[in-house]
Amino acid sequence: MSELFERHRDLLGRAVQATQERTYWSAFSEVPSGKIYGERAKAEGASAFEARLGKPFNLANHPAEAPVGNEVSPYGRRLGITYPAASITTLINASQAASSVWAAAAPEGRVGVCLEALVRLNNLSFEIANAVMHTTGQAFAMAFQAGGPHAQERGLEAVAYAYSEMKKVPSTAVWSKPQGKGEPIVLEKKWRIVPKGVSVVVGCNTFPTWNSYPGLFASLACGNTVIVKPHPSAILPLAMTVDIIRQVLAEQGLPEDAILLAPDAAGSEITRDLLKHPAVAIIDYTGSTAFGEWVRNNAQADLYTEEAGINSIVMGSTDDFVGMCDNLAFSLSLYSGQMCTSPQNIFIPSSGIETNEGSKTFDELADGVAAAVDRLLADSVRAAGVCGAIANPATLDRVSNARKLGRLVRDSAVIEGQGDARTATPLIVAVETDACDTYGEERFGPISFVIPVDDVRDGINRAAALASKKGAITAALYSTDDDVMNFAADQFARAGVNLSVNLMGGIFVNQSAAFSDFHVTGANPAGNASLTDAAFVANRFRVAMWRKPFQEAAE
Amino acid sequence: MSELFERHRDLLGRAVQATQERTYWSAFSEVPSGKIYGERAKAEGASAFEARLGKPFNLANHPAEAPVGNEVSPYGRRLGITYPAASITTLINASQAASSVWAAAAPEGRVGVCLEALVRLNNLSFEIANAVMHTTGQAFAMAFQAGGPHAQERGLEAVAYAYSEMKKVPSTAVWSKPQGKGEPIVLEKKWRIVPKGVSVVVGCNTFPTWNSYPGLFASLACGNTVIVKPHPSAILPLAMTVDIIRQVLAEQGLPEDAILLAPDAAGSEITRDLLKHPAVAIIDYTGSTAFGEWVRNNAQADLYTEEAGINSIVMGSTDDFVGMCDNLAFSLSLYSGQMCTSPQNIFIPSSGIETNEGSKTFDELADGVAAAVDRLLADSVRAAGVCGAIANPATLDRVSNARKLGRLVRDSAVIEGQGDARTATPLIVAVETDACDTYGEERFGPISFVIPVDDVRDGINRAAALASKKGAITAALYSTDDDVMNFAADQFARAGVNLSVNLMGGIFVNQSAAFSDFHVTGANPAGNASLTDAAFVANRFRVAMWRKPFQEAAE
């Protein structure tokens, strides 16, 4: 088993270094290029995906009592794939039966399995891109990046932390306590990593791999057995993931059931019963605040959550008006605002702001962003490539209703020529400052509000207060004033929000880079943990010791 | 503020090294010697303690609405000290008002305050020893060690972990992402430590400082404000602690209310209301399982617990019969079995075991331990020095009732010549193997059971199963057989119990050494966390970032 560890030792070492430095580092190329992934990789990925459609998904030796599966692509097609499902009792029993051997595989053995699985998943990135695209509605390029290499890097990051945390505990030490003039008391102590138990990962519809891999691989590396509960609309990417890990486990003579899939059907979800099972020791949850609240109130297990938030942009001043508007337009449009990092509220001083093009009024600024969205999405092919499709039909209803919430600055529209795809471009609505009920709720999807405020500091205060109360994962500020930047840095840090200032060009507030950005702070209602840091991993195992007089060990 | 950090930099560095190596290291001498602490330290400590009696405890500038305090020494004296008490609203408001400045004091500033306070507490160890002795009933020598230097070392260990965890996060990084042939995207990123909020430490009656210091100092170092809720019977040692920390804070121009005392009166405890307050973000709880269950079910905050457990000894074989019996006798007698690490159940093969004195029957082994206790406690002065006094009168009732639970092997008795002190030497009762209801409950105090089992492995299995179900912090095995040792190591590790094998002489299963032993595994019902490891500290703060284009930073 340590063969896999040796094979990937350099990768792990570099990843550990990256978690400490948090400068730029990438393990897996985000470019869907034939030169990197092989000239036939794209075509093979597409055909492998096609070959899965309309059939049962084969998870070798997996508990299977009744098939489930009813995924429909946001691009229109019914996937027609069924997955092996089993009762919670069957799954928990299988998971626990795998526990002892998996726990005994030693940190290096387990980390080796995780690293090998991640590298194999990386090789499958094109097929995974198709699977992610047709379950989430992400455009292909994003599905490749976020669903493939970026997700794999988040998983690798978690494995690096897990390895570091486990290795922090020495496996043995000689403890020699002086006794004045007498002989010292000398004990030999041995420590071992003890897993916490069954770990359940609850996946979401929009980022089934990216949001699941950190918890999944962290728990697995630390010796826990893992049950993956995918969203009923996005099972395939996680089924492929579970399949690959089980293959690696089987090849190593380790129990495949160390990882299990717990698919269910919309309307008869098993999540509540699964999470309440007393054997469940760790829960990673990504999803709505409504269900998150149930989990927080009902789970006895350790809980790591990412729930909803309301992300804000605050305008103060800029020396690049067009660059600012273009950057925001992309952030609003990317995956039609369906990212946990997408901005919703744009706070603009009611008297306008100073720019390189002179003073701009509130309306000019709102219209400037709207015009930039129009420019970005003028070409429907490009629009489809940026916006993708809408994962959940309810989002379209939400867009319709949001139109009535204020003055329309930019209307949402379908993207032309996209066949049966469910599409919607950004809706921008102007509301009054005191319309807190309108912009103070998360309205998931391509829905944004422009909100007048007294000045930039008022905007910062309102955005930060909303983050403290309702949660937020990102915030963005445009300002040329260092004092304002520092004020914003203080206020958003207190509210537990990661802040981006003056982003222009090809970097966006929505983006969170593995090995550098801690995703979610865990310091406001948007989530209680961060992907991925030491605290996310350190409590996924415990340590047990035995000690005895040293003399006996020397016998 | 970094002056204090610089002053104690070497101490911190050595402590960090010790947490990694976990070999023997001591920061503060456990020897109550005039040569180390000053020839007048003992007398001064005693008179300082005496001077506190019968008066209000002066906590300068502390919120004070009504005095409380009704401590009675287990050695007989009424302390007559009152402490400033305030409503929960007052305390939370004061704590939150101190939060911003304390959080802004930077890790080095906060760690410096903690280190200075620990060193000052160390200098007060003789006075603290008196305070601990007369609130817990510990004999003076133990009160000095466990209440003074050992507790201070546990606090230092927590500060070392806190510092390591905080410094793991870089404060700044330049992130440069290649863009093919284009210019890279370069961002400057800045991270800061964000505290979680108000941290409440709930102290216990028996180890008010030792069990409280890790959570108290870890939370404080990570930037949280701390409210210390002492047990109504053991306020003084924690009031002194809070006083010292507030003095250091005041000298540094930092808000004293970063640490507050929340004393209450028996029968009108404020604990439930305090722990349920929504501002409370972290709870460290040491106490009964009954109240622990309430806390687990009602607290919304992060929770670190040490609750009750049932610790076991298993006999298999020994090459030093007398040494084994003497060692166990001391473990049973020390502080009259009122340690969370004290053994309760002694599993002995019904057919006896092999020893260096030949085969010994079950009865000979049980009587051997009883005789060793008699030897140890034959001299009443020595007996008082080992057993101390009984903290809680209810423990005496428990001893009385336990006499009837089986066949008396050794009766409990008062220690002669101890005046009004509440004393009780170890009770040893033989029960049947199937009397699980008897020995399967924690019976806190000097109460032990000898229980016949099929053989040593049966004993190990029963002890480990009981630990998994009811919790245990320690286990001890006597065996000359490596296979049995390894079997026990496996079984107790799975049950989350730290195991001591073949302890003889001056080292005992009850003892847990800072910087080497992780106290409690957090892997069974005896507690959900360990004192002190990375997981105990890593989630006491969060991290917030702001990032901006690097060019602007260079302006």
Image (tube, coloured by chain):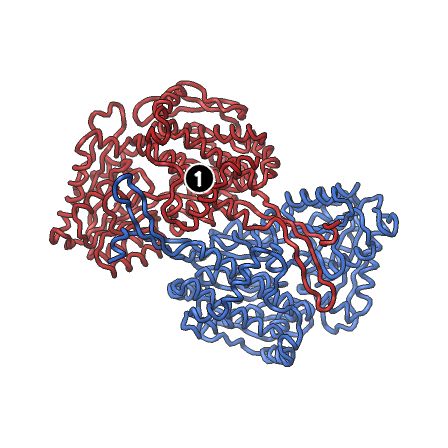
Chain colours: A red, B blue
User: Which residue is rendered at x = 78% and y = 50% of the image?
Assistant: B450
- Which quadrant of the rendered structure holds the N terminus of chain A? top right
Give residue B328's quadrant in the image: bottom right
Give residue A386's quadrant in the image: top left
Q: Secondary structure at mark 1?
A: helix
Compared across the picture, whether A158 is left or right of A382 comes to right
- Across and down, in percent, residue A353 comes to 16, 54
- Across and down, in percent, residue A384 comes to 24, 30
Q: Is residue A549 above or below residue A449?
A: below
Looking at this rendering, what residue extends furthest in the left direction?
A: A358
Q: Residue A514 versus residue B257: which sits nearer the camera? A: A514
Name the residue type under label 1: Gly
- Residue labelled with disc 1: A155
Q: Is residue B505 above or below residue A151?
A: below
Q: Is residue A411 above or below residue A542?
A: above
Q: Residue A279 versus residue A11: which sits nearer the camera? A: A11
Compared across the picture, whether B35 is left or right of A394 comes to right
User: Which residue is rendered at x = 16% and y = 43% of the image?
Assistant: A407
Q: Is residue A528 visible?
A: yes
- Across and down, in percent, residue A550 comes to 71, 54
- Mark 1: few, some, or many residues within 10 Å (few <14, many ≥20)? many
Compared across the picture, whether B500 is left or right of A443 comes to right
- Across and down, in percent, residue B330 comes to 75, 60
Compared across the picture, whether A131 is left or right of B375 comes to left
How many numbered marks does the figure carry? 1
Looking at this rendering, what residue extends furthest in the right direction?
A: B358
Q: Is residue B273 visible?
A: no
- Circle 1 chain: A
